[in-house]
Amino acid sequence: MKRQPTPDQLLLDQQLCFALYAASRSVTGLYRPLLEPLGLTYPQYLVMLVLWEQDGLTVRELGQRLQLDSGTLTPLLKRLQSAGLITRQRRQQDEREVDIRLTDAGLALRDKASGIPECLAQCMQLPFEQMQSLRDELKRLTRQIQLSPNED
Amino acid sequence: MKRQPTPDQLLLDQQLCFALYAASRSVTGLYRPLLEPLGLTYPQYLVMLVLWEQDGLTVRELGQRLQLDSGTLTPLLKRLQSAGLITRQRRQQDEREVDIRLTDAGLALRDKASGIPECLAQCMQLPFEQMQSLRDELKRLTRQIQLSPNED
DNA sequence: CAAAATTAAATTGTGTACAATTTAATTTTC
DNA sequence: GAAAATTAAATTGTACACAATTTAATTTTG
């Protein structure tokens, strides 16, 4: 009954997926103390980034941008609404769609968030160029995955 | 009342964090159809990878390896136990610790999982060397983050 | 144009994540 | 060696993710 050693391909340290999963959660952890004074969670911060860039999107458009569905966004947006940062309103021209808009408070929060990216760059100790190339390689990977047919 | 354009630093597409977050969820999505026949979720698969590598760890040791706490692991491990893949037992020499061990079924599942890494590599369309370097850069980033004092 | 198909959100249910607290066992200290 | 401190899991509570279904509005089609 000699036990086979785990083949290299199944070793945790070999996995790109785990490196990604661990890095993503670590970076999110860096944001936590910076976002806490703003009263935002990390996914909520992402929504605010999108809205600061372009206000007045539908839930669907926000979802496309962030790759999140209404099952995730609807409750998250309700919390942002409770916090007074956004409004949610059915559109007149198509009542199926819900228009998400920043309140004055939501817009004002951008100033308080403006220092966060630089603070993060400090924490990560990555030269700007290296940060860019890592980011772009990850984007390429994500795009590649989403193009592939995902057998159905 | 002219609205200021969002500064570059706050643009979603500039964020390394979002590239990481999106890539991690995309890759997890690739695993889903491959793990479903094994009856595993992605975090459960990670636990199995660790146990296939070294059986008989405590919850704390598993947590160190995967960077997860007992709040996440305890219910996850209970599900693996319900699925008949592991056993959970208090250790005799220290009753605070819970020993996690593979059942025969849990060990046998390794064979069914052995093809997954290659399948993933196919999907991601990344040359092996590039996959390795991306993985190692992510590990370096994670290590860097976890070293930094995280102001307290 | 009315029935069928499609679409956008919301809802439901399961499974993480993670902070904070609790419980129980072990170590340390006085 | 008993009280205090520490430690390991478990528990509690909040907030995602995401599959699957439901609801309501719009579009397409026969």
Image (cartoon, coloured by chain):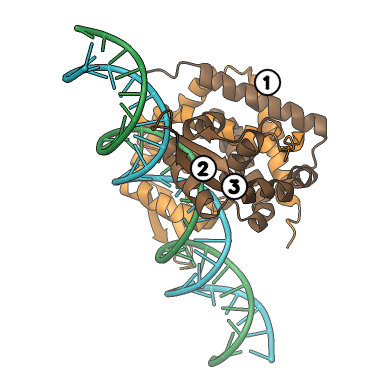
Chain colours: A orange, B brown, C green, D cyan
- Report the Cα–Cα distance between label 1 and label 3: 48 Å
Q: At which x and y percent is residue B48?
A: 61, 42
Are the two marked residues, 2 and 3, in contact with CB atoms closer than 8 angstroms? Answer: no
Up-down relation of residue B83 to residue A104 (above or below): below
- Distance CA(mark 2)–CA(mark 1): 24 Å
Protein chain holding label 3: B
Tell me what residue is drawn at x 36 percent, y 49 percent: A79
Q: Is residue B1 visible?
A: no
Where residue A72 sits: x, y (%)?
48, 53
Q: Which quadrant would the N terminus of chain A be assigned to in this image?
A: top right
Mark 1 sits on what residue? A129
Between residues D2 and A118, which one lies in front from this camera angle? D2
Q: Position of residue A110 (x, y in %)?
A: 42, 33
Q: Are marks 2 and 1 on the same chain?
A: yes
Question: Label 3's element?
Answer: loop
| Residue labelled with disc 3 | B103
Name which quarter of the figure residue B114 lies in.
top right
| Mark 3 neighbour class, 10 Å CA radius: few under 14, some 14 to 19, many 20 or more | some
Residue visible at 41% across and 51% down in the picture: A77
Q: Quadrant of the C terminus of chain A?
A: bottom right
